[in-house]
Amino acid sequence: MAEFRLETDRLVLREWRDSDFDALHALCTDPQVMATIGPLNDEDQSRGLLQRLQARQERDGCTFWAMERKQGGRVLGFCGVARGTVPQLETELEIGWRLASDCWGQSYAREAAQATLDWLAVHHPGEPVWAITSVGNTRSRGLMERLGMQYLPELDFDHPHVADDSPLKPHVTYWLPEAKGGRELWS
C-alpha cells in the first residue's frame, strides 16, 4: 500500500517514518512548544509517541501526520486527525497539531489544518470534527476559531493524562459540525 501523502502549497502531511524520531523528539523537548501541552519528553516517551502515531495510521488510516516543509524537507511538527485521544471523544474525529516554535507565525499550522479538514470532507463526509487544548493555549484556540470551530464551554474537562496539580489540566473543547472543503490535495 502506498504511503499516505497530502500536499499543500508549502507542506507535505505524511505517515511517520522511524527516521523522523529526531525531529519528533526535538519538538517534544522544546520548552516553548511544550509550555501549553505538558512536561518535556524523555527519549522513551518520544519513541512511544512515534509508535502510537504510526499505529493509529496503520489501524485507522489517519493520525496526526508528520508535517514536512517541501522546501528542504524538514519535519516541522505534526497535524492531522485521529479518533479521540481522551475518553470524552474516544470515537470522535479529533484534529490536532504541534509545530516547532521557530516556525510559529508563518501560517504552517493553519495551512496543514485546512488541508486536514479538506481531506476529512472527502473521506469522512458529514462527520463532526473536534479539537481540545489546555485552557491557556491561546495560539491553538485562535487557530480553532479561524478554522470556524465553535467553543463549547459546557464540555470543558480536566485532562485525564495531566497531573492533578498542573495548570494544564483544565481543557477546552471545540467543535465543527462537519468538515468543509474538498480540494483534491492528496495523492
Image: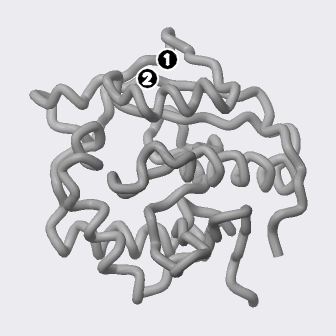
Q: Which is more toward the observer, 100 or 82?
A: 100
Dot 2 surroundings within 10 Å: few (below 14), some, or many (20 or more)?
many
Q: Residue at x 84, y 38 (%)?
A: 180
Contact flag, marks 2 and 1 (Cβ < 8 Å): yes
Quarter of the rendering occupied by the N terminus:
bottom right
Q: Which is more toward the observer, 36 or 7?
A: 7
Q: State the image quarter where residue 160 is shown.
A: top left
Say what amino acid the circle numbered 1 marks.
Leu
Q: Residue at x 40, y 75 (%)?
A: 51
Q: Secondary structure at mark 1?
A: helix
Residue position for label 1? 155
Q: Residue at x 61, y 75 (%)?
A: 70
Quarter of the rendering occupied by the C terminus:
bottom right
Q: State the image quarter where residue 36 is shown.
A: top left
Q: Residue 101 location in percent, x, y?
A: 33, 52
Judge whether 34 appears above or below 89 on screen. Answer: below
Q: Residue 139 location in percent, x, y?
A: 42, 32
Q: Earlier in the sequence, mark 2 or mark 1?
A: 1
Relative to 73, 147 lies left or right: right
| Separation of marks 2 and 1 at Cα, in angstroms | 7 Å
Residue position for label 2? 172
Q: Give the numbered dot on residue 68.
A: none
Q: Which is more toward the observer, 50 or 28?
A: 28
Q: State the image quarter where residue 170 is shown.
A: top left
Q: Residue at x 16, y 49 (%)?
A: 39
